[in-house]
Amino acid sequence: MTLSKSQYRRGAALPNSNPFQRLAALLEGVMPGMDSIAMTIGEPQHAIPDFTAKILNENMGDFRRYPPINGTPAFRNAIADWLEKRYMLDDLIDRNNGVLPLNGSREGLSFGAIAARDQLAKGLDHPIVILPNPFYQTYAAAAHVADSEALLLDAVNERQFLPDLDALDPEVLDRTVAFYVASPTNPEGAVADISYWQKLITLARKHRFYIFADECYSEIYRNTPPPGILEAAKAMGGDTAKVFDKIIVLNSLSKRSNLAGLRCGFAAGDPEFLSKWVKFRGLAAPQVPLPNQAVAVAAYGDEAHVIENRRLYNQKFEAAERYLSPLMGKVTPDAGFFLWLNTSRWGNSVSVTSKLWADTGVKVLPGAYLASDQSDGSNPGRNYIRVGLCAPLETTETALERVANWLGDKS
């Protein structure tokens, strides 16, 4: 099956400003109808792990030192230990070459496509980078800096909010150097199952492209831990030395541990790719400070704070069901901390966002701003708003009650 015009859009349609700049322009000069409550950005507000300050203080002197670009052995081992325990990987992670520290997963997502393009050496004037639509804007930036053509695959409810792998023409895949996909997805909170991951892995190895699996919401789930791409690769069997071939998974402490400001994440997976990438990063990328790595070692060794973090988010999703499900049906996704609400009964995402702000003071993000318009004028985010449940429970409940009352009045 080949892609139809309604299923993908080339990079020319990418937004020319970020969603939050567009939101600011939309609401400029509009006074909120009540005291304002921001439910837009996915910035964690729960407590950071209580050991963070102690570890930073104990390692303060290491801010004098240039850190190794490939991280400390303690950092690499902590990441490998966590991945192997979380995904039952049976000591398959290469602890010397299969783990890299990042200044947050965003850094790796931004520049991974350059490494993919250069390492694959396909000799293309315009290689392709595939990303979902809606998408995290950093994926589009990655295609841009890699001088590649962004090809967007609509992620819609009918396909569980995941890109349709069966829609891709083999000739397109042969030109592809990187495929960006998130699970759990942002903004929808959908989860790729093992079979989906394995189908994507099979395509990557057949057509020679790298998968950048953004798993930063992996620990913010309702009941069942989402499967990961490394787990799926292990289940495929084969040569253990090549078990993670063409796979790079990225994660960080931002969502898992509420440490977004620490800027500490990792890339793991294909040791051949990562051992070459680290040489480029040694010339061009900032190292992760040693005290930050020390915090990461402790954070990835502790699950108690993660369990509590998840409990607090799940409380807020329970509140969302109480307030919104009588009007909209089930609203709770499998994972993540966003609501992805279909507001088509009340208007498109931009008009609903504007009216909610003017009438209730609740600030949400239009789904249309997280997606790209298609050539036929459609936009897979047009009828959705993204509502972040990062604020404390009391504030979240106030916002949800206002939204529910507004929707009820307009029904």
Image: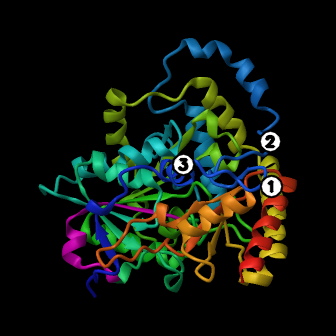
Residue 147 image point, x, y percent:
22, 49
Residue depth check, mark 2 versus mark 3: number of the one nearer the observer:
3
Identify which residue is drawn at 58% across, 54% down. Answer: 216
- Are the residues tagged 2 and 1 within 8 Å (C-beta)? no
Horizontal arrangement in the rendering, residue 361 relative to residue 92 (left or right):
right
Residue depth check, mark 3 versus mark 1: number of the one nearer the observer:
3
Give the Cα separation between the discs numbered 2 and 3.
28 Å
Tag 3 residue: 24
Residue 204 image point, x, y percent:
33, 68
Numbered tag placed on residue 307 in the rendering: 1
Numbered tag placed on residue 228 in the rendering: none
| Quadrant housing residue 1 | bottom left
Mark 3 belongs to which amino acid? Ala
- Are the residues tagged 3 and 1 within 8 Å (C-beta)? no
Q: Earlier in the sequence, mark 3 or mark 1?
A: 3
Residue 234 image point, x, y percent:
50, 67
Circle 2 — which element? loop
Mark 2 belongs to which amino acid? Ala
Instruction: Determine whether 356 is above or below 48 in the image.
Output: below
Query: Relative to the observer, which residue lies in front, 325 or 249?
Result: 325
Horizontal arrangement in the rendering, residue 388 relative to residue 283 (left or right):
right
Tag 2 residue: 47
In this view of the protein, can residue 219 be seen by the observer?
no
Query: Relative to the observer, which residue lies in front, 363 or 50?
Result: 363
Identify which residue is drawn at 61% across, 77% down. Answer: 342
Q: In the rendered structure, which segment of residues is drawn in magenta?
A: 167-182
Mark 1 belongs to which amino acid? Ile
Instruction: Determine whether 316 is above or below 271 in the image.
Output: below
